[in-house]
Amino acid sequence: MTTSLIKTTTLPVMESFYTLQGEGFHQGKAAYFIRLAGCDVGCVWCDVKESWDKNLYSEQTIEQIISNAKKNPARLAVITGGEPTMYDLNELTNELHNEGFKTNIETSGAYPLTGNWDWVCLSPKKFKPPLQDILLKANELKIIIFNKSDFAWAQKYASKVVSSCKLYLQPEWSKAAIVTPLIIDYIKQNPQWELSLQIHKYINVP
C-alpha cells in the first residue's frame, strides 16, 4: 500500500542549526541543517530517535524556515530527519534556491522524492527498503555498517544505483571501534567504496 505524502504549507522542524557537514561527500563544508520531525522507518541504532514523533514539535512556515536559514553565511542547506521524504518539499527547495542555496537531502528513500535537489544522499535501511526511483537519483549511497553482514547488503544496493553515484561505508557510531577496521580492510579490497566518518562527533559539533 502506498502512503500519501503529507502536503502542507508548514513543516514540523525538530531543530535547525549551522555547523559543518560531518559525513559523506560534503564532509567538512559549512552547512545549515534543517531536521524535520517524523519517521516510521524505525532504525534500531538511530541516534536521533527523538525525531520520530512529529507531534512533539511545532510547525514552521516555509517563510520562517527560509528566514532562519538566511541568517547564516553559507549557502548549503541540508534537509534531514527523521525521514524528510514523508513531506512535499517542492516549495521549501524552490525557496531555498531562490535565496541562492544549494539543496542537499539525507534520506532512507522510503517515500517518493519531491523537491529540487542539488545532491541526494541515500542511506537505505533494512527496515523499510528504498524506492527504485530514488536509487536512480542518488548522488551518494551511504551504507551504515553495524555488523559483517552489512557488507553484502551494501553491495546489493551499490548494484542498483547509477554508475556516477559515490559509494560510502560508515561505521555505526556505537560499534565504530569494532567495525572501522573491518571497513578499512573491505575498502582496500573493494576500492570503489570510500570511508565516511561522523567527524562532527569527533570534533564535538552538532
Image: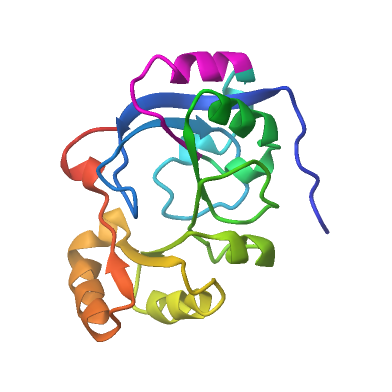
Q: How is the image coloured?
A: rainbow
Depicted 165 relative to depicted 80: above or below: below
Depicted 106 relative to depicted 164: above or below: above
The residue closer to the viewer here, 63 or 37, is 63
Q: Position of residue 137 (x, y in %)?
A: 59, 60
- As drawn, the residue found furthest toward the bottom would be 189
Magenta stretch bounds: 63-80
Q: Is residue 66 magenta?
A: yes
Q: Position of residue 7 (x, y in %)?
A: 77, 33
Taking the image as drawn, is residue 190 in sight? yes
Residue at 68%, 38% (x, y): give it. Answer: 87
Q: Which image quadrant for residue 180?
A: bottom left
Number of numbered discs: 0
Answer with left or right where residue 189 lies relative to residue 116. Answer: left
Q: Which image quadrant for residue 8?
A: top right
Q: Is residue 81 magenta?
A: no
On-image quarter of the N terminus: bottom right
Depicted 68 relative to depicted 203: above or below: above
The residue closer to the viewer here, 92 or 45, is 92
Q: Position of residue 160 (x, y in %)?
A: 57, 76
Taking the image as drawn, is residue 61 in sight? no
Answer with left or right where residue 76 lies relative to residue 96. Answer: left
Depicted 169 relative to depicted 203: above or below: below
- As drawn, the residue found furthest toward the right would be 1
Q: Position of residue 118 (x, y in %)?
A: 51, 46
